[in-house]
Image: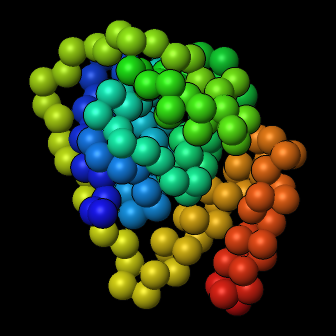
Amino acid sequence: MSAAKILVASGNDIAQVRVIGRATFQAGQSLRDFGLEMIAANVSRILVNLGECEGMDSTFMGILAMIARRSITNSEFRVEIVNADDNLKMLLDTLGLTRLFTFTHTETAAEDWTALCNTVADDGKEQQQTILKAHEALMDVDGDNVPKFKEVVEFLKQDLR
């Protein structure tokens, strides 16, 4: 199965992400970079539309958690999950992430959508670091995730050495 197509737009103090297909680690690096760029630009909200999302892996959910955790230090910022079906909400809830997000069915109109590129550095180290950080974020958000991802984190750390 191919990686999801990720479309992004920004304007009027809001950034938007539209996920089409199955959201995996392959889209994680680009999403993380976009999210951090928008946070640095002081957007007040990032809307993540999951209406066309077919599923998410743990890395992708960890990236969403990394971005949403910025709201802990900035009460003016929040991440809203738009049009998530019950299965996607259950995936997020299984990892204790639903408390990080506001859920809605209302999206702000955007005209200039841009597709994020799912490419990573040739050596794969940057992608491995992103996967590591995403899983560490999942463990930080909810202690119940530690046994789920401890071995993944240790393997990635060892491999990056």
Q: State the image coordinates of residue 99 (x, y, percent, origin top left).
A: 69, 24
Q: Residue at x 55, y 56 (%)?
A: 59
Q: Is residue 95 above or below residue 3?
A: above
Q: Nearer the viewer, residue 143 or 41?
A: 143
Q: Quadrant of residue 108?
A: top left
Q: Describe residue 11's horizontal placement relative to residue 65 as left or right.
A: left
Q: Quadrant of the N terminus?
A: bottom left
Q: State the image coordinates of residue 76 (x, y, percent, origin top left).
A: 59, 16
Q: Residue at x 37, y 72 (%)?
A: 120
Q: Is there any visible trace of residue 17 in the rendered image?
A: no
Q: Quadrant of the C terminus?
A: bottom right
Q: Is there any visible trace of residue 130 in the rendered image?
A: yes
* Image coloring type: rainbow
Q: Is residue 56 above or below residue 96?
A: below
Q: State the image coordinates of residue 140 (x, y, percent, origin top left).
A: 79, 47
Q: Residue at x 33, y 27 (%)?
A: 51
Q: Describe residue 113's horizontal placement relative to residue 93 as left or right.
A: left
Disc tally is 0
